[in-house]
Image (cartoon, helix red, strand yellow):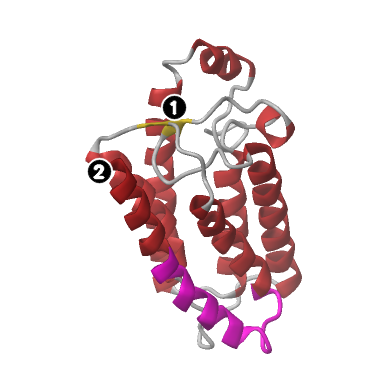
Amino acid sequence: MERLLDVCEKLFLVLLAAPFLVAFYKALPFEPQLVLLALSETLAVFFILIHRRGVVRQRPSAWILGLLGTALPLLVRPDPSATMIAPPAVGTALMMAGLLLTIAAKLFLNRSFGIVAANRGIKRAGPYRLVRHPMYLGYVVGEIGFLLTSFSLLTLGLYLLAWGLQVGRILQEEQLLREDPDYRRYAGRVRWRLVPGLF
């Protein structure tokens, strides 16, 4: 059953990522900075395809949070009628910063990454010295950059839902990880989960 769920989650994400990539590819001649967001979002799919299974939460809520939190940003599309509410340089800088943070976090995770909360080993180096969930922070920063240069109510709604789900995902991950004494020690040293000074 676990193997079937693994195959289904991968297929689901590939089916969502394909139209996402096509839509962003078509918009690249008009907005080349979109490649930054497209890379950031699809890197998650790539790492899920090659991830290493760990001790996984079996509760349906963990699967729902993980799947929807990953899937909702893949429903965002470039919209020529969207409003630019910040200079393109600001949005591009945020998308670049988000992408770099996401890549750094994923490099330190290696294949220890998946949709559902699992203990795949405790990471303490690199961006994990600053916050406990830097990959999610990278997503949020990049998505804010996109939102500033391509604002629409639909995109805002999708991102707000995704961010809410990511917070739920973080809380579920931490509930599982706190069963590990190494993680409890790590959480004692790195105070902030996602945003320094806030959460």
Type of residue at label 2?
A: Met
- Residue at the spot x=44%, y=18% of the render? 178
Q: Quadrant of residue 96?
A: bottom right
Query: Callout 2 environment at 10 Å: few (<14), some (14 to 19), or many (20+)?
Result: few
Query: What x and y, as percent, mark residue 36?
Result: 67, 67
Of 139 and 180, which appears nearest the observer?
Answer: 180
Is 168 part of what is drawn in magenta? Answer: no
Q: Which residue is mark 2?
A: 1
Q: Between residue 56 and residue 24, name the one nearer to us.
A: 56
Q: Chief secondary structure of the magenta span?
A: helix
Cα separation between marks 1 and 2: 25 Å
Which mark, residue 32? none
> Which quarter of the picture shows residue 172?
top left
Q: Is residue 20 above or below residue 174?
A: below
Q: Name the residue rendered at 28%, 35% in the picture.
A: 58
Q: Element at badge 1? A: helix
Q: Which residues are magenta?
A: 14-34
Of 48 and 86, the residue lying toward us: 48
Placement of 15 over or under 48, stated as above or below: below
Q: State the SS at label 2.
A: loop
Residue at 66%, 54% in the rendered image: 98
Q: Position of residue 176 (x, y in %)?
A: 39, 24
Check contact, mark 1 vs mark 2: CB within 8 A: no
Q: Earlier in the sequence, mark 1 or mark 2?
A: 2
Horizontally, residue 59 falls left or right of residue 69, namely left
Q: Quadrant of the N terminus?
A: top left
Which residue position holds label 1? 174
